[in-house]
Image: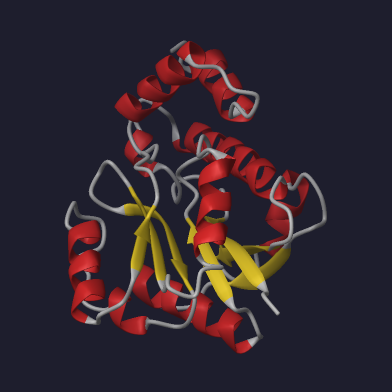
Amino acid sequence: MLKQALVVMVKAPIPGRVKTRLCPPLTPEMAAELYRCFLIDIFRRVAQLPQVNKIIGYTPEGTQATFHSLLPSQDFEFIPQRGQDLGERMVNLFEDLFRSGYTSISLIGSDCPHLPPEFLQKSLDYLKNPDVEVVLGPSEDGGYYLVGLSRLQPEIFQGIPWSTDKVLTETLNRIHQLGLKVALLSPWYDIDTLEDLKKLTKEELKQPRKDLPLETLGFLRKHLKI
């Protein structure tokens, strides 16, 4: 029996701790509000997916209540992140969830409020194939926006130069060294800088979709006029 999970890794929207690369032009308070908009848009996308358990991996511990007002439904579970760096936190999330009986797990970050839901569904579909052991969603900045596993593979998260443009390359090298079968999703981009925000506004308004990141775009129109 398949039991799939989709995990969104999130931080509490605390001023000075989220989207700091956007300060300036944003104040820390504005950056925290923008991040809240990101979360609302991401949670709405995840909520659309059928037949998958939706989980929020949050940090810091003790901030779970912060996210309740942002959820489109109560169809979400919570699990705290544990670990010193991104690699450790991801490994621990995978380990905790595999131990609880999941047969495959896809994990995304919180920097893509505009991520097409069909990308998420594709990752779940790939992991139903017994020949696929790892799924990656390449980011344009050299990282990845999604990683999915059919069983725990801690080695692919160890010794990776996080927050660099080498993350995807080094991860793929590790996957190939381990002889694992990987499937790649379509490339996408994170929203980290002002240029990313401008790109989001131009592309989303040129190619409107029914699943536009409405909260994020509303914030941008109100505060940045872009």
Which quadrant does the C terminus fall into? top left
**Left or right: 156 in relation to 126:** left
Residue at 34% x, 42% y: name it: 187
Which quadrant does the N terminus fall into? bottom right
Is residue 145 visible from the viewing direction of this image? yes
Residue 148, image x and y in percent? 46, 66
Residue at 18% x, 79% y: name it: 177
Q: Is residue 207 above or below residue 1?
A: above
Q: Is residue 39 above or below residue 103?
A: above
**Left or right: 3 in relation to 127:** right
Residue at 58% x, 66% y: name it: 57
Q: Nearer the viewer, residue 25 or 94?
A: 94
Residue 33, image x and y in percent? 57, 36
**Left or right: 126 in relation to 153:** right
Is residue 9 visible from the viewing direction of this image? no
**Left or right: 190 in relation to 11:** left
Residue furthest out toward the right? 74
Q: Is residue 101 above or below residue 47?
A: below
Residue 144 in which image quadrant:
bottom left
Residue 179, image x and y in percent? 25, 80
